[in-house]
Amino acid sequence: MSALSPRLGKFWRLILAVVAAFALANLFVTPAVAHEEHRKQQAAAEARERQLAGGAAESPMGHEAMEGMVMEMDRSNLPFFERLFGWIGRLHPALVHFPIAFFPAALFTVIVGRKRPAFAAPVQFLVVAGGIFAPVAAAAGWLAAVGSDPDPILNYHRWIGVAVGIVGAGLGVWAWKRPWEDRGAGMILALTIMTVAIVIQGFLGAAVTHGFEHLMF
């Protein structure tokens, strides 16, 4: 037990560090990105007013196309860090695919590897890689949602994503520090929970974009 205590201490310090990072992002990054969102909405409103003043028939483009153009033009005038945070947020759809791939693949590999030792070798790599990308994807998703309208589905998606990022980082440390345990029952249980959470996250993420009934047959 005494030999395990320092490792547990490091694990909980890592968890607290990730939580602190999300708290700092909420305190300092959120106002900057929200300001960008406000400026986008203001620019879109000004574009609509100009379109109405000039006559809707004179413009060949619709409201959505004009708003998109104004937002793109407006972004270039934003301060560097506001543009950087917004850009990181727009990376979320790409980054989220990595934990989606790594953790379920690790679960499959660790189950098959219990009877086929050759399949067990990649488990550590998959879990560690997922542990690296999970908090990064969660942070990017948090930035992407800043300034959005209040939505219960988005809130669930956001906070489950934070939990996946924190637990994923912890699993990555566990697999890195104690590779001889990466095929045990504890790791299988943890990866199963992570895989279920990722499936739920995928559904909620699609519901935010396409509506809650997007999988209706």
Image (cartoon, rainbow, N blue to C red):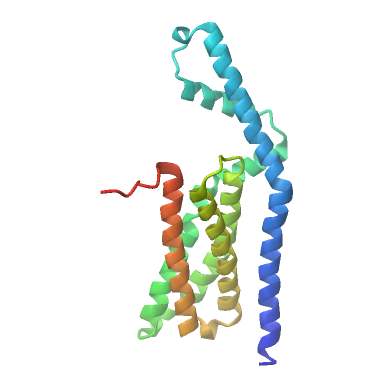
- Taking the image as shown, residue 211 lies to the left or right of residue 86, namely left
| x then y, percent, for residue 89 | 58, 45
List the single residue furthest toward the left: 217
- Taking the image as shown, residue 148 lies to the left or right of residue 153, namely right
- Taking the image as shown, residue 110 lies to the left or right of residue 128, namely left
Q: Residue at x 41, y 54 (%)?
A: 203
Task: Say which quadrant the N terminus sits in.
Answer: bottom right
Q: Nearer the viewer, residue 155 or 54?
A: 155
Q: Is residue 34 shown above or below 11? A: above
- Residue 73 visible in the picture: yes
| x then y, percent, for residue 178 | 58, 83
Number of marks: 0
Q: Nearer the viewer, residue 207 or 190?
A: 207
Q: Nearer the viewer, residue 133 or 215?
A: 215
Q: Residue at x 56, y 39 (%)?
A: 149
- Residue 119 visible in the picture: no
| x then y, percent, for residue 216 | 29, 48
Q: Nearer the viewer, residue 101 or 22?
A: 22
Q: Is residue 126 shown above or below 136? A: below
Q: Residue 137: which quarter of the image?
A: bottom right
List the single residue furthest toward the bottom: 1
Q: Residue at x 68, y 74 (%)?
A: 12
Q: Is residue 108 shown above or below 116? A: above
Q: Residue 84: which quarter of the image?
A: top right
| x then y, percent, for residue 95 | 52, 53
